[in-house]
Image: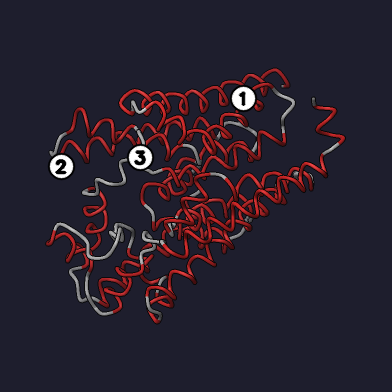
C-alpha cells in the first residue's frame, strides 16, 4: 500500500487537488452568502462612537445576525477599513482575507519546519477542505486570523513578530494561550510586547466612546461570559459551568483562575520537550481542552497534523495524524449520527486530553532514552 502511494504520489495529488478546488469554491460560495459571524456591525457601532459592549449588556442581546461583539476592543479598531463599506461588500473583503490566511498558514508552517513539497501540498489540500476551515469561511469567523498570529512567534523570532502576535488576544478563548506560554517560559519581554496591541485597543476604545476606562476594560470579558451559543463543544470550563458553577460569579471567576493555573502547569510540562514544532502543536491544543470553542476552532489541530506527517515513522504520530483527520472530516458526521452529545462530547474531550498526555509522555521517554 505504501509503495503504491509513493509510486503514484503525483497522480494522487492531482486527483485530490481537483476535489479540493471544488470544495474550496463551495466554501467561498457559502461565505459570500453568509459570513454572519464577521464582526462588522459591532465595529460600525464603535466607529459611530457607541460602546457596543455597554449597549449589548444593557439590552441583554446583540443587534445584527450572530455578531455578538464578544471579542476584545482591538478587533473593532482593526476592522476600521471595513466600516467604509456596506455589509455585502465588507463580508466579501473579509472572505478574501480569510482565504489568504487559509493558504498562508500551512505554507508558513511547512516552510519553517522543512516539510517536503509533496507533504506541503497534501497538507494544504487537507487544510482547505477540512470541516473547521469550511465552517470558518462560511461563518466569516475570526479563527484563522487568530491562529495566524498565534503561530507567528514560533515561525519568526523577532520583536516585531512578538508584538503582532498580541493581535491573537482579540479572541479570549484562544488567544490567552500565547500569553500564558510567555509567562510559563519567563519570557517577560515577549509578554510585554504582545500585550501592547491589546492595551492600545482598550485605550482607543474607551477614549473614542467616552467610556469609563476601568468599567470598559472588563466589559468584553463580562459580555463574553454571558454568551451561550458558543458552548457547542465540550471543554473543562463549560462542563464545570453546566454541572457545578451555576450563575454565581465568584465561583465562575475562581474556577477560571483554577483553570489558568492547571493550564500554566501543563504548558510548563510541554515546554520541557526539546522539539519546538511539537511544542507549538501541543500548546495550540490547550484552548480546545480548557475553554469554550466551536467546531471552527479545531483548525488549531493543524500543526499537530503537520508535525505528525513530518515524523510519521513513529507509531504515536501515525495515531496523531489519523486522529486529526477524524476531527477534520468525520467528527461532525459521527456527532450527528450518534446524536448523544451528553456522552459523545465528554468522550471527545477525554480523547483530546489523552492525545496531549500521550505525546508529552512519549517524547519525554524518547528524550531520556537518547540522552
Name the residue that disc number 1 marks.
Answer: 319
Instruction: State how far apart marks 3 and 1 are (Cα).
Output: 25 Å
* Res 291 label: 3
Observer-nearest of 69 and 51: 69
**Would residue 26 be found to the left or right of residue 203 on screen?**
right
Q: From the viewer's side, name the closer residue of 58 and 211.
A: 58
Q: CA distance from mark 2 to mark 3?
A: 16 Å
Q: Is residue 43 above or below residue 329?
A: below
Relative horizontal placement of residue 351, taking residue 100 as reference (left or right)? left
Relative to 203, is 215 on the left or the right? left
- For the residue carrying disc 1, how many other residues have a C-alpha within 10 Å: few (<14), some (14-19), or many (20+)? some
120 vs 96: above or below: above
Which mark's residue is nearer the viewer, 3 or 1? 1
Q: Looking at the rendering, in which quadrant would you find the C terminus?
A: top right
For marks 1 and 2, give the one nearer the viewer.
1
Vertical comparison of 300 with 62: above or below:
above
* SS under mark 1: helix
Residue 317's quadrant in the figure? top right
Give the residue number, with chain letter if any, for mark 2.
Answer: 249
Looking at the rendered image, the quarter that the N terminus falls into is top right
Q: Earlier in the sequence, mark 3 or mark 1?
A: 3
Picture quarter containing residue 34?
bottom left
Please state the horizontal and vertical placement of residue 230, each as a whole percent of the image. 31, 46
Amino acid at each position: 500500500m505504501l509503495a503504491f502511494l509513493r509510486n503514484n504520489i503525483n497522480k494522487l495529488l492531482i486527483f485530490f487537488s481537483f476535489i479540493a478546488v471544488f470544495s474550496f469554491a463551495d466554501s467561498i460560495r457559502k461565505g459570500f452568502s453568509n459570513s454572519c459571524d464577521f464582526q462588522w456591525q459591532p465595529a460600525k457601532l464603535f466607529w459611530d462612537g457607541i460602546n457596543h459592549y455597554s449597549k449589548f449588556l444593557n439590552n441583554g442581546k446583540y443587534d445584527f445576525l450572530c455578531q455578538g461583539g464578544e471579542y476584545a476592543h482591538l478587533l473593532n479598531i482593526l476592522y476600521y477599513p471595513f466600516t467604509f463599506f456596506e455589509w455585502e461588500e465588507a463580508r466579501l473583503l473579509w472572505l478574501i482575507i480569510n482565504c489568504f490566511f487559509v493558504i498562508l498558514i500551512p505554507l508558513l508552517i511547512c516552510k519553517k519546519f522543512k516539510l517536503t513539497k509533496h507533504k506541503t501540498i497534501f497538507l494544504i489540500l487537507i487544510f482547505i477542505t477540512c470541516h473547521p476551515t469550511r465552517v470558518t469561511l462560511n461563518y466569516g469567523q475570526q479563527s484563522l486570523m487568530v491562529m495566524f498570529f498565534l503561530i507567528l512567534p514560533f515561525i519568526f523570532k523577532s520583536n516585531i513578530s512578538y508584538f503582532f502576535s498580541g493581535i491573537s488576544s482579540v479572541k479570549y478563548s484562544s488567544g490567552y494561550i500565547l500569553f500564558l506560554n510567555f509567562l510559563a517560559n519567563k519570557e517577560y519581554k515577549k509578554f510585554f510586547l504582545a500585550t501592547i496591541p491589546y492595551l492600545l485597543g482598550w485605550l482607543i476604545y474607551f477614549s473614542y466612546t467616552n467610556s469609563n476606562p476601568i468599567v470598559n476594560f472588563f466589559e468584553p470579558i463580562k459580555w463574553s461570559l454571558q454568551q451561550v451559543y458558543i458552548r457547542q463543544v465540550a471543554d473543562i470550563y463549560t462542563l464545570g459551568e453546566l454541572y457545578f458553577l451555576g450563575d454565581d460569579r465568584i465561583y465562575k471567576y475562581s474556577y477560571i483562575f483554577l483553570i489558568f493555573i492547571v493550564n500554566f502547569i501543563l504548558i510548563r510540562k510541554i515546554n520541557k520537550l526539546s522539539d519546538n514544532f511539537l511544542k507549538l502543536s501541543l500548546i495550540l491544543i490547550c484552548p480546545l481542552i480548557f475553554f469554550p470553542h466551536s467546531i471552527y476552532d479545531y483548525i488549531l489541530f493543524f500543526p499537530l497534523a503537520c508535525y505528525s506527517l513530518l515524523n510519521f515513522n513513529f507509531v504515536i504520530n501515525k495515531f496523531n495524524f489519523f486522529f486529526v483527520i477524524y476531527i477534520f472530516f468525520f467528527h461532525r458526521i459521527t456527532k450527528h449520527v450518534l446524536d448523544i452529545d451528553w456522552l459523545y462530547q465528554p468522550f471527545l474531550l477525554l480523547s483530546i486530553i489523552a492525545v496531549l498526555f500521550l505525546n508529552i509522555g512519549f517524547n519525554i521517554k524518547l528524550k531520556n532514552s537518547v540522552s
